[in-house]
Amino acid sequence: MKLSNLYIFLLQPNNYFIKNSEYPICKNCVFFKKDDKFPDDLILGKCLLFGKQNIISGEINYEYADIIRKDKDLCNIKGKFYKRK
């Protein structure tokens, strides 16, 4: 490969060096809900697919989306239960 071709290859935008770029993004999923108090902070977003109901009050507490994506038994890094909005 000539040096000029190498420069062209390195300057072209691509996803070869961006980790996880092939996986779906939670904020585009129907089950993703932004935090009510901090809607601009997507890290605080929750997944409406996975929650735990309080047996006394009936209130459902949902888990943070980033925790759901890290758990291989739940949605995991690949977004197993992802549904696009």
Image: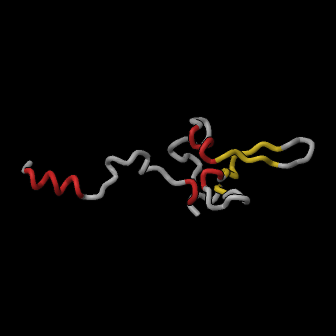
Q: Residue at x 65, y 51 (%)?
A: 44
Residue 45 x %, y %: 65, 53
Q: Residue at x 91, y 47 (%)?
A: 57
Q: Nearer the viewer, residue 81 or 7?
A: 7
Asked where in the image residue 84 lies, by quadrant, the reply is bottom right
- Please state if 3 lies on the left or on the right of 79 as rendered: left
Which residue reaches farthest right? 56
Residue 73 x %, y %: 60, 35
- Please state if 76 lies on the left or on the right of 2 as rendered: right
Q: Residue at x 58, y 58 (%)?
A: 27
Q: Residue at x 70, y 45 (%)?
A: 63
Query: Is 42 placed above or below 75 here?
Result: below
Query: Is 31 placed above or below 71 here?
Result: below
Residue 61 x %, y %: 78, 46
Which residue reaches farthest bottom? 85
Q: How is the image coloured?
A: secondary structure
Residue 48 x %, y %: 70, 52
Q: Nearer the viewer, residue 76 or 36?
A: 36
Query: Is 4 placed above or below 63 here?
Result: below
Which residue reaches farthest left? 2
Query: Is 40 placed above or below 65 here?
Result: below
Quadrant, the C terminus = bottom right
